[in-house]
Structure formats: C-alpha cells, structure tokens
Image (cartoon, coloured by chain):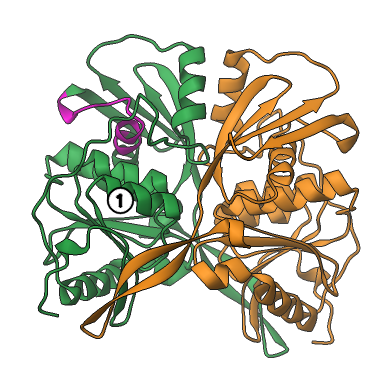
Chain colours: A orange, B green
Amino acid sequence: MENEIERIPILRVSDGNASRIEDMVAREFPLTIILNDQEMVTLLCSPVNLDYLAVGFLYSEGFLQDSDEIKRVVVDQQRGVARVEVEGNEELSSDVLFKRMITSGCGRGASFYSATDITSQKVESGTQISPAEVRSLVLEFQHRSSTYRATGGVHSAALSDTGSIQVFSEDIGRHNAIDKVFGQCLLEGISTNGKVVVTSGRISSEILLKVARRNVPIIVSKSAPTDLGVKLADDLGITLIGFVRGKRMNVYSNDWRIADSG
Amino acid sequence: MENEIERIPILRVSDGNASRIEDMVAREFPLTIILNDQEMVTLLCSPVNLDYLAVGFLYSEGFLQDSDEIKRVVVDQQRGVARVEVEGNEELSSDVLFKRMITSGCGRGASFYSATDITSQKVESGTQISPAEVRSLVLEFQHRSSTYRATGGVHSAALSDTGSIQVFSEDIGRHNAIDKVFGQCLLEGISTNGKVVVTSGRISSEILLKVARRNVPIIVSKSAPTDLGVKLADDLGITLIGFVRGKRMNVYSNDWRIADSG
C-alpha cells in the first residue's frame, strides 16, 4: 500500500480552527504502455501492479486476444514504462491507432456497442447470487480497500465467486482498477467465467464492455449505473446490481440470477 | 434535467423483500466532436449543453486558444455530432493527433505538466476565501445538483466568485462537467480570472491543468486530490481545498488565500 500513498503537510480547518497536520493522498503516476516497440497510451494510475494494468488495458482495448500471445512483460517503474511483447509484430499505423482511440476508447472516448471492432457476445452462465451473498461480498470488498480508507482517493475492483474475493485491485482510475483485475487473471491463468465483478465505481458502457469481454455474468457496485450501462447489461445477458448499501440494492437487468434465500 | 435522465424498471431488494419499481438513471450519450471537418474525439457524456462541452473540450486540449477564434458551433443532437469551426483551416495529421492523444490527454491519458505543448503559467490572483464562504458555496453547489440527487450517477462543476455560483454544469464525466463550465464561459464571455471552481470529483493533475489554463486561483471539492494534483496546485499558485464536509475541510496548497473570519 505504501507505494500508492504520499504523505503531505496540509492545513486542516475544522469548525473555524486551523491546524497544520500531515495527511495521506493517493499517488498519481504516468505509465506509458509500449506494445512491440509501439507507444500505445500513457495512463495516469496508482503505481502498483503495473504489469497487470498494461496487460489488462491491452486486452480491454482489443490489442490482445489471449494470454497465450504474451511473450514478455517488462515494467520499468523508474521511467514509468511497461513493455509488452506479443506474438506477431505488425506495426499499426498512427492512422489506425487514432481511429481506434476515437471510436473505441481511451477512457473519455466511447467503446461502442455497435462498433464493428468490438465483439460483444452474450454472456452465457447459470450463476446465481442471493442478496445475502451480495451484501457479504460488498462488506469484504470494503474491508479490503485499505488505500481508499487511507486517502479517499482511489477506486477498487475485485473478481470473486459468489462466496469470496479472489482478485482485488485499487487504482485512482475506475477503468484501471478493473483492467488490473483482468490483467492479473490473464497473467496468472485465473478463470473469469461465471464469476462476479465488484467495483466501487459507476457502471457505464465502457465498464460493461470490459466485463462482457471476460464473460463475467454479474457485476456489483455501491454506485449508480448509466442508462447505456443498463441497456448493454440487458442485451449481453449480464446481471447489473447497483447501489448496494446496507440491506438494500437495485437490480437493473437479468434479475433471474438473483437467488432467493436472502 | 429531463434530457439527462432515463426512467427504467428495476427490481429493488430491501431487507430481503423484492419489489418492481421505476428508477431514474443518468443518460450516457456518445458525442463526436468535429473541428473544421476533422473528427477529433468521441466523448461519452450527459446529453445537455453539448455546445459548451465541445468548446470546453477543444480549449482544454489546446486545440482552441481563445473564443475569438470560434466562427460557428453547430450541434446535431440527433446524430450525436458537434461541429466547431474556427479561424484557420490547417488539418492536423493523424500522426500529430495520435501523439497528442498519447501525451496530452483524452482523459485516460496524461496531461503532462512537463510536456512542452502545455503552457501552464502560474496563476496570479489576490483572491481570498474564508472557510465560511467555502461551506456556503458547497451547500449552494449541492442544492443545484438536481440530476445527481435524482440518479446518483453524475458529477457537477461550477464557477463562482467567493459569494455565489455563476455557472453550473452536470455530466456523467467529471472532466466533461468542468469542460462544460469553461465552454460556457468562453461562449458567453464570462471571465474566469480570480474566480473559484467547485467540483464534485476528485482533483487529479488533469483537472488542475484545466483550471490553471483558465487562470482560476481556487479549486474546491468534497472529494480527495491526488499527490500530482497537489504538486501542480502548489507550483502553479492555486489554492486546492478538498474534503469539504460539514464544517471541516483540508487545504492542500497556497493556504495564504484562506481568509480568517470563519
């Protein structure tokens, strides 16, 4: 956790009284991802698990189809560079890359449902989850979010089965946190089929497409979804559970996966 | 507000009981911004004030230096396109655009402090603000955030003097909300010098650079900053106030702008 946090002096004003104290803030780190000698993107992220982030990002953006393709991942933390070498060595033209960035991503951009280069197959899984299991997962999730508790400045994401968390990540970006989880799964051969993704962030279309690409049938958040997130979840066979707070939650799509008992 | 919200049927689970109700979620809309016939980016945003967003985005990314340059802004809401025509007509090559996107932005990318194409001059302003004024602004800010109260799924941003809010925007993206505020200021000739920006979102380096570019000396948020956000605020002469909650707030930089009385 230490690497993700910086201690800085601040002025705290409380009820009219000011005092100089030390506070902890989340670190923000620029990471340049290079795929086969080609610079792809510079992400602002939390400086931990950068290999997972690089691989997860390349997978989410469609530059990587399977972990078998990966020959090597080298992270130079000093220089803020992650190099990923994959099978095949065709260099993409700037023209192609820019078009991709416009139509498919880069966070602010749109990952279009209808875009021809995004293959969003319907998620097929009979996994069900009870409200009690959802609550229990969210409690475990919050318990694990130590950088968030220290700084209030990061997002978390996790992969779990219906019982407990298997992979957990924190990052200043909600997209990055999920990419780190999937990057770890790819590098360590952890299956995501039939699993649950928990996120602290809002569920927009881009988040939904990441999850669909990994064949994950259930996504859970304490935050809100967007209408496009719900529409995609509906169409892609994903159960979207939002606003999990205390004993309450909203199920926005495919609610047949909600088991009784709870 | 209606345009930013979609009503959808959901299953609400509360304390073990499930009921089908109608809920409101924030709309997510893809807007393609075209500058002098050249496609620049597709943003996912809330479908309101798209002219402000297009102009604010182009300004933040450095494609526009001043409102004088703008010849025409045409928004086609049906097709999700905003066309901005400016003086001069040089087309940028995909190569240049892609390099820009990598090094300077596009949300997930990094707006580098040290990058040569970002001119971050120190903000010169004698504006001061008291803790009581900060609290009062944040209360007014929360009161205005009607889409947030309805959906929990959007960010807000505002421009104010130390007394009250002058320009207010909501958007599903925290970058977009601030770009909308500055876009409106540019199109309507509202000065941002010596003003205060209030945001619901976390204060990262990219947010700081947007604010510095408009010569705004004070930024206020109920959320956390990152270490890079604090460093930039420090260096660029901006007073960064975070975690404004109740009668408490943290001042992370240039605290000489905090006036007594409160």
Which corner quadrant of the image does residue A18 belong to? Answer: bottom left
Q: Quadrant of the N terminus of chain A?
A: bottom right
Residue A115 screen position, x and y as percent: 66, 31
Which corner quadrant of the image does residue B5 belong to? Answer: bottom left
Residue A146 visible, this orientation: yes
Q: How many marks?
A: 1
In this figure, which residue is indicated by the disc labeled 1?
A: B233
Which stretch appears magenta? B55-68
Residue B48 visible, this orientation: no
The amino acid sitting under disc 1 is Ala
The residue at the point 16 percent across, 62 percent down is B256
Query: Is B32 left, or right, of A166 in this rendering?
Result: left
The residue at the point 20 percent across, 83 percent down is A16
Q: Nearer the viewer, residue A208 or A73?
A: A73
Residue B109 screen position, x and y as percent: 51, 37
Callout 1: chain: B
Q: Nearer the viewer, residue A152 or B222?
A: A152
Residue B223 screen position, x and y as percent: 41, 66
Q: Nearer the viewer, residue B238 or A87?
A: B238
Q: Is residue A29 magenta?
A: no
Query: Is A170 left, or right, of B148 in this rendering?
Result: right
Task: Determine the secondary structure under disc 1.
Answer: helix
Q: Quadrant of the C terminus of chain A?
A: bottom right
Q: Is residue B41 above or below residue A17?
A: above
Which corner quadrant of the image does residue A133 belong to? Answer: bottom right
The residue at the point 57 percent across, 28 percent down is A101
Residue B38 screen position, x and y as percent: 42, 17
Q: Is residue B65 magenta?
A: yes
Q: Is residue B70 above or below residue A160?
A: above
The residue at the point 77 percent across, 46 percent down is A183
Q: Is residue A82 above or below residue A23?
A: above
Please rate how many residues cluster around mark 1, counting C-alpha atoms within 10 Å: few if below 14, some from 14 to 19, many from 20. many
